[in-house]
Amino acid sequence: MQTTTAEEARTRVRQGTAHVLADPDVWPPAFQTALEEKGFAVLISRELNELFDRTHDASPDLIILAKRNARFAIRACRAMRGLRDAPTIVVIPSESDFVPVMDAGADDAITASGDPIVFTTRFRALLRRTQNWRSGQTGGIISVRDLLVDLDKCEVILRGRPASLTPTEFRILAVLAEKAGRVVDARSLLAAVHEHDYDDREAQNLVKVHIANLRRKLEDGRDGDPYVLCVRGFGYMVERRSAQRENDPLLALLDATRVGQETG
């Protein structure tokens, strides 16, 4: 009777390829095992140029950055943006690195000491989200004033010029644009984008970073007519109107901060 090794079994159910830029002391063996157990081929690169070469030769399904130097991880994350339409997870040495790497364009981040089960849940959610968008579950162009959101091409045009957004920023904007004029709370917004149920505090912190980046890239508020509004205590919305109505009860709840700033 022929036996099947674990590696052969994993190969038969292979779901994709994960490209990892890692320092050994930051990349937990348990995380690699979690990927392999879900059928992923894991290719480890030690240098950024090696990762670029591998990504150029074959598009990965997932990119993971795990470096002990947080500043290098941030630079690498920025360098990877737009290279391939693959979700990026950054494995960070400490919680203090969370905001900087998310600000640099990561789709998610987890500490190296994190639970492998949580890591598995997050990367699977990111992959499901990417597959759903690629399969064209939604399509067409959403028009809000001078803003065009092309759901088929995953492009955003503002006043005739393209806006360079990360995949997560684009999906957040797409969800808000589809519900223009309605407030979406942070937890529901993140669940729609990541297909993972974060707790309220985690969702608020994560969405706050993405919204700040999104507003900055849309130059929101510079002309006095912002697109993305923060409704204090409730969530976020895309404003369809070019000007607020007088005595609008929503005005008292709007966050008055401008580009690149959020108060939650």
Image (cartoon, rainbow, N blue to C red):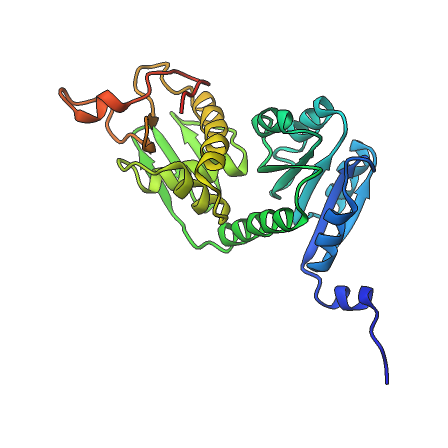
- In percent of width and height, residue 57 lies at 76, 46
Which image quadrant for residue 229?
top left
Which image quadrant for residue 179?
top left
Q: Between residues 145 and 4, which one lies in front from this camera angle?
A: 4
**Does residue 243 appear anywhere in the picture?**
no
Residue depicted at x 81% and y 43%: 44
Residue depicted at x 47% and y 37%: 203
- Image quarter where the N terminus lies is bottom right
Q: Looking at the picture, does residue 120 appear above or below residue 239?
A: below
- In percent of width and height, residue 61 lies at 65, 49
- In percent of width and height, residue 40 lies at 72, 56
Question: As drawn, is 61 to the left or to the right of 216?
Answer: right
Residue that protrudes farthest toward the left in the picture: 247
**Does residue 99 appear anywhere in the picture?**
yes
Q: Between residues 111 and 243, which one lies in front from this camera angle?
A: 111
Question: As drawn, is 255 to the left or to the right of 196?
Answer: left
- Image quarter where the C terminus lies is top left
Q: Looking at the picture, does residue 57 appear above or below residue 75?
A: below
